[in-house]
Image (tube, helix red, strand yellow):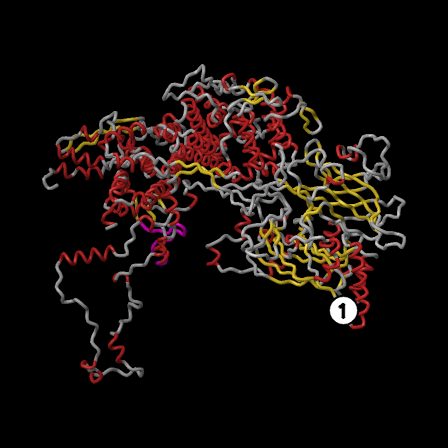
Amino acid sequence: MASLGSAERRAFALKINRHSSAEIRRNFSGNLGAYHTRTNSNTSPTTYLIVFSAGPQSYEAVEPLDLEEFLMSQLRSEDLALMQELGDFPDDDLKVEQVEKECRTVRHSVPEEGGELDPHVRDCLKSYTQPWLVVSRRCQGDGWSTYSERVGLHKVLQKQVFETDVQPENKDKPVKSPTLEGLTDDSGRPLTSSDFNLRCLAPDKRLDGLMAFSSPEELDRLNQQARNGNRHPELFALYPPPDEEDSVEIRPIPDCPKEHVGERVLIRCQSIKFEIEIEPIFATMALYDLKEKKKISENFYCDLNSEQFKHFLKPHTPHVDVSTLAKSAIFSITYPSPDIFLVVKIEKVLQQGEISDCADPYMTMKESESKNKDKIEKLRNQAEAFCQRLGRYRMPFAWATVNIMDVINSAIYVPDLDSSKGGKSSSIDRKLQLPRRNSERYTCIEEQFCQVGGFKPASITISTIFKQEGDRLSDEDLLKFLSDIKKTSRIKTIPGTIKLDIAPFNDMPQACLSPELIPLKPLAEKNIRPVKEVLEFPSNEVYVPHNIYRNLLYVYPLRLNFVSRLTSSKNITIKIQFMSGEDPSSALPVFFGKSSGPEFLKEVYTPITYHNKSPDFYEEVKLSLPARLTERHHLLFTFYHISCQQKQNQSGSCETLIGFSWLPMLNSDRLQTGQFCLPIILERLPINYSLHPPEKLPPQVPPVKWMEGHKGLFNLEVQAVSSVHTQDNHLERFFTLCHALEGGAVFPLRVKEEKIPENKLEHELKLSIISLSSSSLEPLVLFLHRVLDKLFTLIMQPMVIAGQTANFAQIAFESVVSIVNSLHNSPELVKDQQGRNSLLATYLYWVFCLPDPPQNMQSAGSGMVTSAAESRYSTMGRATAATVGSMLLQSRVRSSSNPDIPGPHNSAEDAEVKSILSSKGHNIPGSRMSTYVDMNNHQNPTGSTRPSNRKQFHEELALQMVVSTGVCKENAYKYAWFFFELLVKSMAQHVCQMEKHSVPRRSRFSDRFKDDITTIVSVVTAEICTILVKQHKEVEQAEKVNISLAFFLYDLMSLMDRGFVFQLVKNYCNQMSAKSISMATLISMRLEFLRILCSHEHYLNLSIFFSSPASAPVSPSPSISSQSSGSCSFQEQQRILALFDLSYEFKQQHYLTGLLLTELNAALDGDLDGGKVQRKAINAINSLLCCHDLDIRCEKPEIRAKVAALYLPLVGIIIEATNYLDFTVSDTRSGKNKTGDSEMTLRTSHPSISLSPWRLRGTPLTHWGGMFWCLWHPCKVNP
């Protein structure tokens, strides 16, 4: 540099002192444009074109490179090995894999019976057992995941203390030398010369090697070694990460779908003891929610009898299955409440006498008293006789209760703050992830913090056992007792105790059984007593889709009214059977057994209330429904009178038949549930009775004799817990009509009470698709996966109905949009931080797979197949769907942007969209037709991107988004994230299925599809601009749509032509700049957009960081520095300086980097939103550099050098802003400066840079100089 002239020596200084754009705007405000010439006496003039406008600063994004062509040219000209490592994406980058479902049980819960299954059941079983389908990319998130894992690393570094940092504790008081202090005695006597004896003093420690000779080279080597010791190799990891709310590039992966379970509690029944023990007793436990006035669990049956008493029942229990010997149960509570009670009901074997008579010995006798010994033995003998004769019948005896939440809260852990910050989430954290409750019970703060987990195991003893009253047996009576639990002193009690152990559920115990009695993992190594999972009946809705096969039915006999009947029938029981036909041998063993008996039974009996003609029942009958139900399946109820005392002339059975009733399982091919009041037939059942409900039994010959003139006398309730039967009219109709399209249906098709001929099937199916949005939220969510799968199949698969081709693509797409809108607007459902509905995000990531391609077109009913070569179809246009489409629009909510305006409205926004469509040749919405090309008539030349002869799902979906209008279009783009991720996953599957990962990116997708993608991106960008310009209150919604669009292009860069995606990015930037949006909002939106794009795992490859400037294509306009070069040395200097300039060539070649640095330059150039925009811009650059530093792919020194060269223009940007930056340290959270903070706070706080006159807080500019030095000289960091 010494040989250079003064002009050359000042070149870099001139570069530093160039005018900032802020100064230029102040000097030339009001001008629309001007040429500014800056001259120097010793240099040639340099001309800059400055563009001014009255509005906010904007820029036109440069034309990007054709990246695919550029990479191909580099492969031909550059080092092949380097290009394969640094250039194109890896061949195995895209991965579509099947992930086996995690099964809690040792086998899948599937029906065991063979035979042909219904199409709906078959689809459900396939959905519940097939693996998840996950699309991933091999290197996705490498740098970002490492960065997130290193959070807080700076806090564990060793503090370095230097001599200048050590300050004396007391500056005013001089410190005595240690020698003098040691010589001073305790008396405080002044020292004299006689106190010193230098020969007796201990010498100081000798310094080793003090006089040894060392060469300067050796000293430098030792110093270098000492400096490199304990040096952290990753400088960026030492800087605290930004707040999570700023990390827009993190897209959370939804949790894998699992079977819903609430907070779980393990309860073990240890013993039930009375003052006397004379007979077997049986316990039943269940949970009740008092505030919801509802039973919230199924029954758990427990037998604690001794072997002696079990022997009493031997004639009635031919064998005992291990699954019925459980004494412990796992209860689940989804919605904890202070008023959840555990109720223990106690039964005994039926015997002669009222409940009070049977309970009297328990209340008056004690086994410890010798005077009662003979009486107790006599009672025991009587009980044995009753057990031998009436062992299958039971009677109510007593009950007890305990507030389960009081027990849990009294044994709750009180964790310290340190332990609660890390590790597993607490029960409160898990509760916040549950669906919200639309109930008054969550209005109290104390109820929101009812914890079920995290308490100490507790043993409780219940000493208050109430005698059961024969006329108050129903659940309604029980809930009244619980509400007046403190006033139950008027109820008689039986002396005794019930001992229970209650423990939190931590790990799955061995030998645990599911509610279907399927063993759970882990299996027991030896035969041990099982533990049962008790099925929960949540007190409110649970919005978790089904993912296991479950098909259970619960029958609750309520009451029987024989009061007006003149009969001696008083001890009434009901035998319940599940029949597959009318023959007595058709009874199926589907009833779950109770305790100490068979696992499954063919019949069950209700408990008996002695001498009661109008008994109430409390029995819960649980059965496993067959997978295939027919019109012959029914519940058969047989009513008996039971003789407790055997008469002298009576022999044989103690049962006296009273009558029959029945309940068909299907009503118009739909499972019957709810409450019923059935009449009772007195004589034998007529032929074909099971085909009709008892209320509508047709006249018989001879006539049927009914009790009390065919009046309903028997009340019961039937409830199903099924992942097969939807129990919703709209869903049932939709699934029934969909399966009718698959062939095999017999017309006229019966749906509930109506019969549908084949020529009306298309119309009825479209109506059923429209009515899906009218379904109740809970069943819609439970069967959400099946509903969406069917709708996507209808989008893909055309059908031939009555000889005519029917296409449901448009109506199905509109229904999907309506469902997506309903789920997002439901306050009960959870959303993530980006506003995505968690249920939909889970479906897209784990469940969705491409529908079967339309190999041929099926004919409903006849099963006719039309070959592909003979078929033609097109997407239904708006004009042809006017009737159905208008009904769909009427069923939607009104416009979200203006509730007073109906959905289908015309606005300037629509006009802009129409102009975009017209530019692409879609000036008439709905005019586009999806093509189905005959290969015989249309040859597809090699290398052409013409549409193939098969309909592709991603093409049809993109088409429907383009042609949508009105409310459908508004909601589709409002929740565009769902359709973007749907497009991406379907495109990824298409690439893998067609083996197109080996095909050039340009040929993977058709030109028509690319046009549709371009239109979609343009329309979404227009929607964002419209919201920002006109609807300032919905800026948050615009940010969410903006983020979803960025992630869409982020994903497309791994699937499509990357040059095409860069064009979409360019169009987005220019379209945003063209709108009258505030400068702060504009830069903020584009920064978030670019930050997501730059978080791509192959961002460096996309930015062509490996290529030197010489290999870039020639710029359309020559650089200014090349025009003003006056000598070779000056030209060389200008070439070097150009490396630090954000030039046109740089932005064109390193496209994403150039756009991001341009936004940073614009953000630092003005006072925007109080410095928030500047902080966002700086954090975006900092996060990007941190990921590079932690990326294992950038460990090599030569790669680090190239990465550093990519960010050289950042140096120029910082230099330009240096005059406006105030480098001070400040705590970003408390606002304290250096003098007000403690030393530890200063070590962990974010540095702050002041940009006069505003302040940028939390920005890492102070570290960038050192960071660039480390990147530019990697060998010095990692010797």
Left or right relative to 234: residue 981: right
Note whether residue 1216 is visible.
no
Residues rendered magenta in the picture: 1224-1239
Residue type indicated by callout 1: Glu
The residue identified by callout 1 is 367
Image spot of residue 343 (x, y percent): 69, 55
Q: How many marks?
A: 1
Quarter residue 111 falls in: top right
Within 10 Å of disc 1 (Cα), the crowding (few <14, some 14-19, many 20+) is some
Image spot of residue 375 (x, y percent): 82, 67
Residue 827 inside the magenta-drawn segment: no
Quarter residue 387 falls in: bottom right
Judged from the image, the secondary structure of the residue bearing numbered disc 1 is: loop
Indicate whether 527 appears above or below 57: below
Residue under the image location 59 percent in, 34 percent down:
122
Q: Quadrant of the N terminus?
A: top left
Question: Residue extending furthest top?
Answer: 937
Left or right relative to 955: residue 716: right
- State the residue in front, 43 or 1063: 1063
Quarter residue 727 falls in: top right
- State the residue in front, 1232 or 1057: 1057
Question: Residue extending furthest left?
Answer: 3
